[in-house]
Amino acid sequence: MLQIHADNIYVDLPIYGGRSRSLKHALMRNPRLFGSAKRSESRTGGVIEAEATGKVYVRALDGVSFTLDEGDRVGIVGHNGAGKTTLLRVIAGIFEPVSGEMRVTGTVTPMFSLADGMDMEATGYENIWIRGQIIGCDRAFIADKIADIVEFCELGDFLHMPVRTYSAGMLVRLGFTIATALKPQILVMDEMIGAGDAAFFERARARLAAFIANAGILVVATHNPDIIRTWCNKAMWLSHGKLAGFGEVGEVMDRFAAASA
Amino acid sequence: MVTQRQIAAATRDLVSGLLGWRIWDLLARQEIRQRYRRSMLGPFWLTISMAVQMVTMGVVVTILFGQSFGRFLPYVCVGLIFWTMITGIVSEGATAFVSSSNLILHLRIPLTTYLIQCLWRNLIIAAHNLVVYLGVAVIYSIIPSSATALIIVTLPLALWSIAWVVLFLSVIATRFRDLPTMVATGLNVLFWLTPIVYTPDQLGAHRWLATANPLAHVLDLIRLPLLNQVPTRTSFLIVIAMGLVGWTAAFLLFARFRARIAFWL
């Protein structure tokens, strides 16, 4: 049984300038220079705080709790800097919360980019193996899927050319096709992955639908309300790192739309 | 300071990092290939540049110190090959997390994967460089003996005794970005303090400079077997002691800050 359970999660993102990145400055730092703790709020972003030591951090998630079960398709909305990407990274296990607990039952597949780990000098064909293994497929799985990938991306002989020679659209085609060959248990996406030119787009939609339908749980953050209303059954609204709403997609999206207007 | 939970999580990271050999092998090979793409000789450029460096340096110091080529050139050759490996491991290890930041922030792979990748990559490079040693061994007819077989034990031991440096430096260098520059300077100093292009005996009354330097013992552990000699018991003890102390410190540091590394990138 797949499940994501977040229990009162706090995440502070440290902000470093050139000075605090320096070991020399850290050793010679004078705490009296910086005064006492400060707080500030703005419409976008998390709460910026400064400790007495001069360490500045942004509270990106501020006591977030929720439970997602198998079959849930959750869209996350919120202003820029509301904590959407941070929350996705915590679910993916990339960030660990400062306090609180994230318990995930099942394997999380983060899908934050389509091209990271690709080798620009290697051919498209080689990159199917490279990228495939980096996102966690074993070689038997790739061998099994490679015919499907080659056929779907329609790159033909270009698969034997270095990826460096690809146009942006061709690169997206390749990345998209490799990513959607997976069968993820828990799929975490930052912005819906979209693909290529008009001709490819319709086929890509169908593949994406099948890909998402195969996932046990989907969590996607996006600024596009239509995507959430189309693909999700639940919505989560983050505001300044706090959970402002969580529940049935129509209700939360209506409230979010009213608040943003 | 370091909780039981942090140590357990760090241990899991290290174990699953080691077990995920396909990923670090893939990343290491990919990086080496990238460096030599579109060059005709590929990674054997490593061998050639090592040969050129070894011949020029080796010949100059041999003449300078009035030594015989047959005795001194193999010594300098093996020393340079493994010094290159050690500096590669340490300096690239210090930036291992920073240079893999796009993968770290987008994928869930144990952090130690990136460190093991750095070690493995430098071992592969050293294997290419060893071709130069084979050439020298043939020219000066160094015939392998039972002492040479010791390398099977001493090479892993020597690697283990310095691998913790990577773990230690990579954590600090991710937080403090001026560290890699300091490391580069330090390695330059250590090159001259370590008997690579000279022998400890040539230091005369200042022989202690070499014997007090743990790196000299690490180097001896690898170098002497390849020159048909047996490393001293002292060298073994110093290297093991350094490894134990270093690993304890580095592992505790890693356990304490492992969860912060992604935030520092």
Image (spheres, rainbow, N blue to C red):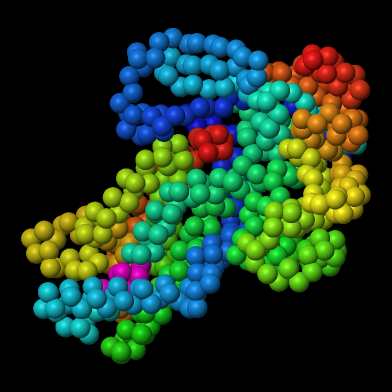
Q: Position of residue B133 (x, y in %)?
A: 35, 79
Q: Is residue B139 left or right of residue A12?
A: left
Q: Is residue A174 covered in magenta?
A: no
Q: Position of residue A234 (x, y in %)?
A: 88, 27
| Residue A175 visible in rendering | no
- Could you say which is closer to the camera, residue B225 or residue B105? B105
Tell me the residue at 68%/61% (across/down).
A166
Tell me the residue at 55%/34% (across/down).
B263
Q: Which image quarter: residue B230?
A: bottom left
A135 w.r.t. A218: above or below: below
A72 w.r.t. B109: above or below: above
A258 w.r.t. B221: above or below: above
Q: Position of residue B65 (x, y in %)?
A: 12, 74
Question: Mainly helix, strand or loop, the magenta region?
Answer: helix
Q: Which image quarter: residue B86?
A: bottom left
Tell me the residue at 67%/55% (across/down).
A134
Q: Is residue B79 covered in magenta?
A: yes
- Could you say which is closer to the camera, residue A26 or residue A152? A152
- Could you say which is closer to the camera, residue A72 or residue B164? A72
| Residue A122 visible in rendering | yes
Q: Position of residue A254 (x, y in %)?
A: 88, 18
Start and end of the magenta stretch?
Answer: B76-82
